[in-house]
Image (spheres, grey):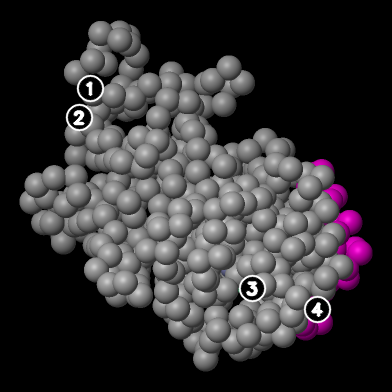
Amino acid sequence: MKAYRASILRFDDAGNAVFDEDGYLLTGPDAKGQPVVRDVGAWTSFASLYPGVSVAHLPGRIIAPGFVDLHIHYPQTDVIGAPSAGLLPWLEDYTFPHESRFADEDYARAVAEVFLDELLRNGVTTALTFSTSHPQSVDAFFGASQARGLRMITGKCLQDRHSPDGVRDQTEQSLIDTENLINKWHNNGRLGYAITPRFAPSCTDAQLAGAGELAVRYRDVWIQSHVAENLDEVKWVRELFPKSRSYLAVYDDFGLMRERSIYAHCIHFDDDDRALMRRTGAAAAVSPTSNLFLGSGFFDYEGAQRIGYHYGLASDVGGGTSFSPFHTMLAAYYVGREGQTKPGLSLSPQNLWWQHTGGAAKALGLAGVIGNLQRGCEADFIVLNPKATPMLARKTSVARNLDELLFAMIVLGDDRLVERTVIAGQGG
Ligand code: GUN
Ligand code: ZN
């Protein structure tokens, strides 16, 4: 067993922060040997409960749950910052040509290593990431993740139409490849598979139907896709799928909405779409830096809260502009302030942080496993140095309460704030 003394940030089941200014975190193996949080609480009670357990004392540091990125593209690590008129030209001009390089597994593995380095430097310990349409891009990513003991989820992109040579796949083979990859990787250690139709316009009816059949046969794999991101895209989907009530309804019509399905963006929704999200248990991956960069629009927090469906935060790199959860949380705050049809929403710092940790884990169906530091959660956590930069030091030292402390870090923080990232109890 290993114990740490520091300030400890965690969340209750409703998403309210629990903060022990002088606290302890005790980690050790569970019954299956997986390193987990064995106990957490106020330092004053530690010595009587755990005499003889040695303690790493981290004065002035905050231990917090590792961040969970609900939607990202590892193959787009080098696409960050590609300017474009909007989503569809961005895909054609930059993203598809770049992704064609991932047919080469060695290249894919090298990018996967850079991507994982970047996630960890930024304190992200689990991501639901797209791979490309090449099965070897999935093998490369899972291989790299497994070597580091990470809990990661990915899947091979399905895109059998409206995609150029080099990334377009073949309907039948794409479904065979998906099933083989599920059998090879899903629940292999900490890894999980996601059935990954890229977005409705890139998939034929036959491919979507096949994906839906796999989603029924493999109930605990994830599903990930994009929906209602951009107005040109929404119009295109209406032309391609005239029988479906809405863009989101296309996925429902093919059996692709259920718990463990994560849809990126969810911007151009009406209340029937929101009700469909709620009824099916699907979740939105809110991607504010991407939406601002590509000019896609603003996630409607008021609508999501009013109807009540699951959502969490995501970087969506390379449409998104940063790996840093602090940048993403700040962008989400801007969207809440200025991007709403009903003005005046002010997302609290505790809620923003929850959306990128425990809330994102809940959206994935992994509440109590990752994204929190309650007893039994896997021991993936970060050590923050709130004095990492001169401005952070000034601002956090005058914080009068937890909200002010969290806000200072959200507004001023980046990878410099993350002193260490501990994976499965290792690295601390
Ligand atoms: N829609 C289909 N593919 C993509 C992608 O790679 N990025 C984003 N942001 N939207 C998409
Ligand atoms: Zn995306």
The residue that appears at 67% across and 45% down in the rendered structure is 192
Identity, as a three-letter code, of the amino acid under mark 4: Arg
Q: Nearer the viewer, mark 1 or mark 4?
A: 4
Residue under the point 22% across and 56% down: 407
Q: Earlier in the sequence, mark 1 or mark 3?
A: 1
Q: Residue furthest right?
A: 172
User: Quadrant of the image for the N terminus?
Assistant: top left
Q: Residue at x 67, y 35 (%)?
A: 189
Q: In this rendering, is residue 45 above or below 80?
A: above
Answer with mark 1 or mark 4, whichever residue precedes in sequence: 1
Q: The C terminus lies in which quarter of the figure?
A: top left
Q: Splitting the image into four quadrants, where does ligand 2 fall? A: bottom right
Q: Element under label 1?
A: helix
Q: Secondary structure at mark 4?
A: loop
Q: Is residue 396 visible?
A: yes
User: In the rendering, which numbered label is found on residue 161?
Assistant: 4
- Residue at horizontal 25%, vertical 36%? 19
Q: Secondary structure at mark 2?
A: strand
Dot 4, crowdedness within 10 Å: few (<14), some or many (≥20)? some
- Relative horizontal placement of residue 134, taking residue 418 as reference (left or right): right
Q: Of callouts 1 and 2, which one flags the residue occurring earlier in the amino acid sequence?
A: 2
Residues shaded magenta: 160-184
Distance between the alpha carbons at the discs numbered 4 and 3: 20 Å
Q: Which mark is residue 22?
A: 2
Tell me the quarter of the picture where residue 50 sits: top left
Label 2: how many residues lie within 10 Å, few (<14), some (14-19) or many (20+)? some
